[in-house]
Amino acid sequence: MNSSIDSTVHHLRQTLDALRDGQLQPEVVCARFRMASLQWPGLPARYGDVLERLLQPLDTATMIGEESCSFSRSDMLDALHQWLDHAAQLPRS
């Protein structure tokens, strides 16, 4: 396994846990995921597209206030974990 990707996956899992625990703001989570996807060697473009769709509710919550948004934070976190699981299983270059 590529230790750089493994480290990225570990860091992103910690990021999601910190968001779940209220230790990080949504905009920090979005920034970390976007930066990681840009630096992820061989990540297919479709993964970036899906990630953007998953991060959009967090972006909206940041702009207009989470209370005004009708999305489940738990469902969104589960979806990001699933995205990360799938991305981590991609063939390594």
Image (spheres, rainbow, N blue to C red):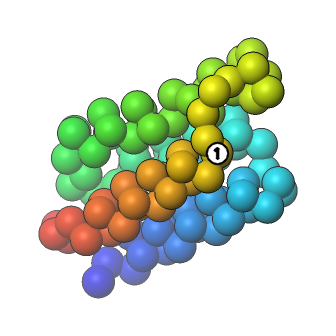
Camera-side residue of 32 and 68: 68
Camera-side residue of 33 and 16: 16
Q: Which residue is mark 1?
A: 73
Q: Is residue 31 visible?
A: no
Q: Quadrant of residue 91?
A: bottom left
Which residue: 62% across, 59% down?
16
Residue 71 in picture, x, y percent from top left: 60, 33
Which residue: 47% across, 61% down?
81
Residue 22 in picture, x, y percent from top left: 82, 54
Asked if residue 32 lies left or right of residue 1, the reply is right
Which residue: 36% across, 67% down?
85
Q: Amino acid at mark 1?
A: Arg
Q: Is residue 51 visible?
A: yes
* Element class at badge 1: helix
Residue 4 in picture, x, y percent from top left: 41, 72
- Neighbor class of circle 1 (other Cα within 10 Å; few <14, some 14-19, many 20+) is some
Q: Which quadrant of the rendered structure holds the C terminus?
A: bottom left
Camera-side residue of 74 and 50: 74
Q: How many marks?
A: 1
Which residue: 22% across, 39% down?
45
Camera-side residue of 1 and 27: 27
Give the answer, above or below, for where 3 lies relative to 63: below
Residue 37 in picture, x, y percent from top left: 40, 47
